[in-house]
Image: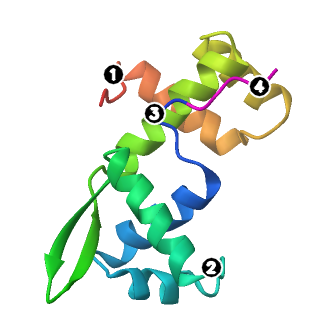
């Protein structure tokens, strides 16, 4: 049986809406709907519902402006990425970041140039950012 999503996880639709807010800044429901049109056409009421869910999840905030709400991202793209990556590592790799990296190597998703840059960071003793 699939595990339920935790509140910090974004569904694919929520992620598309967050991308709109991250890239375009604050927007009304109608503006979000228009910006989504080329990627994921959605009905106005569906966009409104998803934005309200994002507000409840504390991923977005809203303010009333001229009788309409304007929504903005309440978390950064980096924070969302970190949360999703930690979840993937926990669920898919038993909590082991090393297992994730090894899988990326085994499936040839890291090229030689990327490996060289990673080795340089390791040699320099650079610590990864923690959000």
In the rendered structure, which disc, 1 or 3, sits on the residue that comes first in sequence? 3
> If the image is split into quadrants, where does the N terminus sit?
top right
Mark-to-mark CA distance, 2 and 1: 42 Å
Q: Residue at x 71, y 40 (%)?
A: 112
In the rendered structure, which disc, 1 or 4, sits on the residue that comes first in sequence? 4
Q: Position of residue 18 (x, y in %)?
A: 44, 62
Q: Which of 90 and 44 is in front in this view?
A: 44
Q: Which of 15 and 100 is in front in this view?
A: 15
Residue 8 relative to residue 129: left or right: right
Q: Nearer the viewer, residue 80 or 110?
A: 80
Instruction: Please tell me whether mark 2 sits on a helix, a strand or a loop.
Output: loop
| Stretch of the chain drawn in magenta | 1-5
In the rendered structure, which disc, 4 or 2, sits on the residue that comes first in sequence? 4
Q: Mark 1 points at which residue?
A: 127
Q: Residue 63 carries which label?
A: none
Dot 3 crowding, Cα within 10 Å, few <14, some 14–19, many 20+: some
């Amino acid at each position: 049986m699939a595990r339920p999503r935790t509140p910090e996880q974004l569904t694919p639709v929520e992620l598309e809406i967050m991308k709109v807010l991250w890239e375009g800044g604050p927007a009304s429901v109608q503006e979000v709907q228009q910006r989504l049109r080329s990627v994921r056409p959605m009905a106005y009421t569906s966009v409104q519902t998803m934005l309200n869910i994002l507000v409840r999840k504390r991923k977005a905030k809203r303010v009333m402006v001229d009788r309409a709400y304007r929504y903005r991202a309440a978390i950064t793209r980096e924070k969302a990425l970190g949360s999703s990556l930690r979840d993937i590592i926990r669920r898919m790799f038993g909590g082991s970041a090393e297992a994730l990296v090894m899988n990326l190597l085994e499936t040839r998703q890291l090229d030689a140039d990327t490996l060289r840059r990673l080795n340089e960071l390791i040699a320099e003793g650079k610590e990864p950012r923690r959000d």
